[in-house]
Amino acid sequence: MRIFFIPGFGEAENIFDRIAPHIGGNQIFLNNWNELGNAPRKDINVITYCKELIAKYNITAADVIIGHSMGGWIGYHLKHLTGCKAIQVASWTNPDRVILPKLKPSTILWAMKSGLVFNRLGRWFMVRKFYKGNPSAPAFIETYNRLMKGNKNCVLNQMRLILTPAPEAVTVTPDMRIHAKRDSVIRYPKNEECVTVTGDHFTLFTHPEEVYKPIVEFLQK
């Protein structure tokens, strides 16, 4: 059984370090920074990106996708296209669950490109508001630092996967949703079956056992 791990916006493969060793299987870790590249891709959306991943890795209905945050959004569309199993951790199927400024997508992308978002002041504000004294702070700060220092075109490419509407309707549902009610990045699923866990957006970092246990049980079935 191949198990693909897909990290979220700005994250790297190590976001899964505390759960992956307990899950087993033939594990493949995707890196959105590498897959999307550093060239501007203004026409990218989650469907076209998934088609690229399917072609490169030959993803089929026999595979399992475990995605955190944006990675779960990608996994949801991979299931739509291939019939693979999709497990979402702190992710979404309805775009209105993503907590973003109430601005036009073009304005959000412009602000990111101009350096108005991912900077030291922005990091200080976010840590103070959501993560001060929180055990998930190291995971958040590492991700934020990567977004500050990483290639700006790739940051924008990743954000386009979130902001750009999918060009076709999705009719499938994830095989499992794992979510914390105190998530300040993605709202808790509304009227959808969900495994509720402790913590916030980075439960897989702070309470890994609560995340990997239901996944292992699902895979054993």
Image (tube, grey):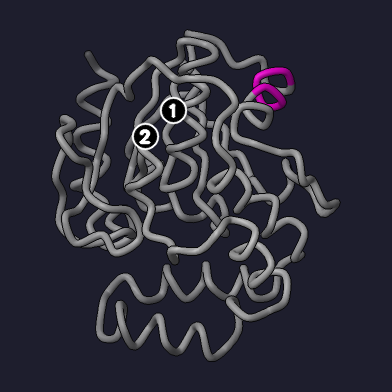
Residue 185: mark in rendering:
none
Is 194 on the left or on the right of 142, as rendered? left
Image: 184 above or below 78: below
Report if residue 78 lies within the magenta region: no
Hey, which quadrant is residue 206 in on the image? bottom left
Say which residue label 2 marks: 93
| Numbered range of the magenta stretch | 51-55
Question: Residue type at mark 2?
Answer: Thr
Quadrant of the drawing holding the C terminus: top left
* Residue under the image location 18 percent in, 31 percent down: 192
Is 96 on the left or on the right of 37, as rendered? left
From the viewer's side, name the closer residue of 88 and 16.
88
Check disc 2 and report its element: helix, strand or loop: loop
From the viewer's side, name the closer residue of 186 and 1.
186
Q: Give the label, 1 or 2, closer to the camera.
A: 2
Estimate the x, y position of residue 8 in percent, counting from the top left. Answer: 50, 50
Estimate the x, y position of residue 123 in percent, counting from the top left. Answer: 49, 83
* Residue under the image location 48 percent in, 9 percent down: 62
Q: Disc 1 and disc 2: Cα gap in Å? A: 7 Å
Say which residue label 1 marks: 76
From the viewer's side, name the closer residue of 54 and 39.
39
Q: Callout 1 environment at 10 Å: few (<14), some (14 to 19), or many (20+)?
A: many
**Image label count:** 2
* Residue under the image location 74 percent in, 47 percent down: 34
Is 113 on the left or on the right of 63, as rendered? right
Query: What is the magenta segment's predominant secondary structure?
Result: helix
Is 182 on the left or on the right of 155, as rendered? left
Asked whether disc 1 touches disc 2, contact meaning CB atoms under 8 Å apart, the reply is: yes
Estimate the x, y position of residue 152 in percent, counting from the top left. Answer: 75, 65
Question: Residue type at mark 1?
Answer: Tyr
